[in-house]
Amino acid sequence: MVDSGNIEIDQDAADALAEAGRLDEFNALPYSHQKEYWQWISSAKKPETRQRRIDKMTEMLATGERPR
């Protein structure tokens, strides 16, 4: 787990955010928004679903969209 400012996220998610240049943007989100993203990602049952959600999170941060 990596402390991303407000919440702890797994290393793979932190790496994906850093590679996409969105880690600072994620860290700037309010705690509740970070938690919403993280719950959405961590609720994935399959590894490929989790990775797809991590990839989608980086895209969503670029557009300001939030998980549903």
Image: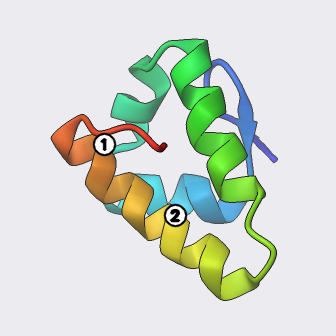
Judging from the image, what secondary structure is the residue with disc 1 in? helix
The image shows residue 20 at horizontal and vertical percentages of 31, 59
Q: Is residue 18 above or below residue 61?
A: below
Residue with the mark numbered 1: 61
The image shows residue 34 at horizontal and vertical percentages of 57, 29
Using the rendered image of the protein, determine whether residue 21 is visible from the camera's viewpoint.
no
Identity, as a three-letter code, of the amino acid under mark 1: Leu
Give the residue drawn at x 30%, y 42%.
61
Q: Earlier in the sequence, mark 1 or mark 2?
A: 2
Q: Is residue 9 above or below residue 42?
A: above
Give the residue drawn at x 48%, y 43%.
68
Q: Relative to residue 61, is residue 40 drawn left or right?
A: right
Distance Cα–Cα, label 1 vs label 2: 11 Å
Give the residue drawn at x 44%, y 20%.
29
State yes or no: discs 1 and 2 in contact (Cβ < 8 Å).
no
The image shows residue 27 at horizontal and vertical percentages of 48, 26
Give the residue drawn at x 71%, y 43%.
39
Residue with the mark numbered 2: 54
Please identify the residue farthest to the top as the structure is shown: 30
Judging from the image, what secondary structure is the residue with disc 2 in? helix
The image shows residue 40 at horizontal and vertical percentages of 64, 50
Identity, as a three-letter code, of the amino acid under mark 2: Ile
Q: Is residue 68 above or below residue 47?
A: above
